[in-house]
Amino acid sequence: MNKRLAAVVAAGVALVVLLTVVAFSEPGSSSAQGVRLTRQPDGSMVLADRGGDAPVLDLYEDFDCPVCKELHTRVNATIERLAKEGKVKVVFHPVTVFEDEPMRSNSVRAAAAARCVPEESWLAFRDELYAMQPSPHGLASGFEVQDLAEAARKVGASVDQCVTSQSYADEHLRESAKIKIDGTPTLLLDGEQLGNEAFDPATLERAITGGTGVTV
């Protein structure tokens, strides 16, 4: 390698290093460990700064639950922003709480499909699930497997066989049965259950950044 080429390569490497340092030094960014979404063995999804020590927000949700959809509409942007800023560790727990049909089967199909979707596409797929939630609740069947596979492809996940075979349905039901909650959505901030204040973005953010929950 001649001297001129070596100088160009060295300058390029220096620029990459500088840009990386700047990226992690921007105001509001998390530590160099980075914020990422990871799937746990029980099917829950953790959005957190791996190097941080933030309060934990556990969110139990049923994708066929209209109130869960309302919560998602109101505060999801706030929750994701705070997680990406390293201010909260969010644990998403997809569950099935309904016993009656067609809600129960709707819920299982959606949650089983969500387990098929890779981590990098999961949050976008979750948005799609709430957008296509069957309505009216209690009457409408929905979350058909072909529609779920199409929604997965829409967010960049080609998992048709996994989705249409419902390969995770039984596992989802086994894990869901272990969770003892009164209904969905249920939010716990460091173990303290949140009430209606969880539906207001500003109030929820104050509770998170203040480090305390408000019990029902």
Image (cartoon, rainbow, N blue to C red):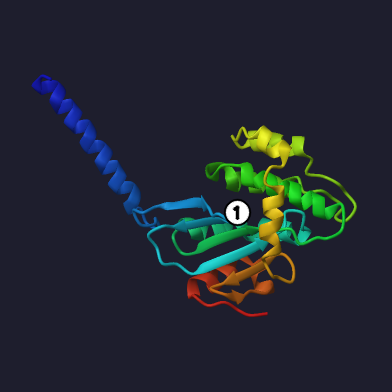
- The amino acid sitting under disc 1 is Gly
Image check: 61 left or right of 103? left
Determine whether, in the image, residue 179 is placed left or right of residue 97: left
Residue occupying image coordinates x 72% and y 38%: 165
Which image quadrant: the N terminus? top left
Q: Position of residue 83 (x, y in %)?
A: 49, 59
Vertical position of residue 139 compared to residue 182: above or below: above
Q: Locate residue 76, reporting x and y percent.
A: 61, 57
Quadrant placement of the C terminus: bottom right
Nearest the viewer among 95 and 77 is 95
Q: Nearer the viewer, residue 147 or 67?
A: 147
Mark 1 lies on residue: 43
Q: Is residue 90 left or right of residue 136?
A: left
Instruction: Label 1, secondary structure: give it.
Output: loop
Q: Nearer the viewer, residue 144 or 155?
A: 144
Measured as percent of width and height from the top left, residue 182 is found at: 74, 71
Residue 43, image x, y percentages: 60, 54
Residue at 63% over, 68% down:
187
Residue situated furthest bottom in the rendering: 215
Q: Compared to 145, does 175 lie above or below?
A: below
Q: Residue at x 81, y 48 (%)?
A: 134
**Residue at position x 12%, y 22% from top?**
4
Res 31 quadrant in image: bottom left
